[in-house]
Image (cartoon, grey):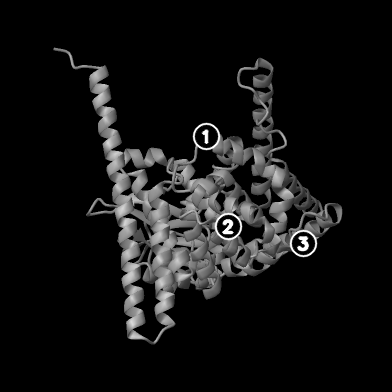
Amino acid sequence: MARRALRLASWTSMALAASGFYLYSNKYLDPNDFGAVRVGRAVATVHLRSARRLCELCCANRGTFIKVGQHLGALDYLLPEEYTSTLKVLHSQAPQSSMQDVRQVIREDLGKEIHDLFVSFDDTPLGAASLAQVHKAVLRDGRTVAVKVQHPKVQAQSSKDILLMEVLVLAVKQLFPEFEFMWLVDEAKKNLPLELDFLNEGRNAEKVAQMLKHFDFLKVPRIYWDLSTKRVLLMEFVDGGQVNDRDYMERNKIDVNEISRNLGKMYSEMIFVNGFVHCDPHPGNVLVRKRPGTGEAEIILLDHGLYQVLTEEFRLDYCHLWQSLIWTDMKRVKKYSQRLGAGDLYPLFACMLTARSWDAVNRGIGQAPVTATEDSEIRNNAANYLPQISQLLSHVPRQMLLIFKTNDLLRGIEAALGTRASASSFLNMSRCCIRALAAHKKRNTCSFFRRTQISFSETLSLWQINLHELVLRVKGLRLASWVLALLCWLLPAPH
């Protein structure tokens, strides 16, 4: 009973935190006003205290709570720094199961003891997350592997969490009719069983590896099926640093801009071209390294339990919408936003998708990177639109919900790397949209002449994007040379 009361208190606290991040925001504080500065420090203290309590609640209750905490910890571009820095620990250092529990799960699922299967098995996990933890081990044949072992009580605990979430959401609905969060319960009911089946995760890993095999910068660890079950997954061991760790990249001479570009290419291909999307790219699941032998930068994609399969109609509408956003065609932005369920809230929908202000969307999201002023505007206005955001999320197609989550996490990585909203990322997205729409048109025509015409139009559009990107690079080089010349003139070399 005490445990259940703690869990109810935890969900209530998390709900209050989710709706109250901005009640003590800094938007009215004047940095030149000493009193305002003192208030700002007090606000930061409140944020930090609340974040620590929220992290403790997540760790105490594990499972679904940690998944929510992981998502919040990745929203660098949206939430106060006190929350994101405190909750980041949940990406790979969540509470661990004991070795006794690990041995029990392996014994029950594989029918053998650890010492019968492995030459060595590290007792300390490489990382622990919401549903499982990963240990490094060496097989009898000498292969080094990563062993993902599900927390033993997580299945029963998750079903109770969903039930408790449903009760709380219904209570909130009674108190605040304008907030509609039942979609959250429906999504949890659908997605958690899939994430808890590690055989499904292995199949997803192999599918995405085959689907994106043309990207030589991507590494998906190989699955060892003979020693994998629904609760135990054996994978090739691949080491690396978290994708948001700039210090690691600087130490290893990895270009953060290259990583950001490649991450954008990879996800654009998944979303716009294939319609099969890895929906949990929090930093603990995306690693980077220098590839052994070649020294090229490599992205390692882990944790393939949660994927979204997009319908053809949704994928094509989404392609059209992003093309309209990139090329600032506001009539088509409205049209395709409404086709995707946004209704009259299409401006808010566009802002949520791009993580940009409505003014920036109207001026062109590829024209300029996010400024500190715009970032502040987004943070400060988020709480003012909570009822509208709730209404929007309850009306869009269910596929859109995981796309929103994926976009949030990718924006958080870009914010941590300092590469948010670069022009090249939008151009790569546009390339994928053009290819996807052209492929759809060619599949739906039997005329050789028409297919040739579509291919020519596709090639021309891609060439125009390449030319536009070249112009942007030349402008950047010219600006750099001007700046260098100016510095040489202002600071002449000593004789």
Task: Specify the amino acid type for callout 3.
Answer: Glu
Quadrant housing residue 183: bottom right
* Residue mark closest to the camera, 2 vs 3: 2
**Marks 3/1: CA–CA distance:** 38 Å
Using a 10 Å C-alpha cutoff, classify the residue at mark 2 as few (fewer than 14 neighbours), some (14 to 19) or many (20 or more): some
The amino acid marked with disc number 2 is Phe
Residue 238 place in picture, x, y as percent: 37, 57
Residue 157 visible to an observer of this rendering = no
Pointer 2 and pointer 3: residues touching (CB < 8 Å)? no
How far is mark 1 from mark 2, CA to CA? Answer: 23 Å
Between 76 and 252, the one lying in front of the other is 76
- Name the residue located 28 percent from the left edge and 54 percent from the top edge: 291
- Give the residue pinned by disc 2: 404
Q: Amino acid at mark 1?
A: Ala
Q: Quadrant of the N terminus?
A: bottom right
* The furthest residue to the top: 495
Q: Residue at x 60, y 41 (%)?
A: 378
Which structural element holds mark 1? helix
Residue 122: image tag: none
The local secondary structure at tag 2 comes to: helix
Query: What residue sits right under mark 1 in the picture?
Result: 372
Task: In this rendered view, identify the residue nearer to me: 1 or 448.
Answer: 448
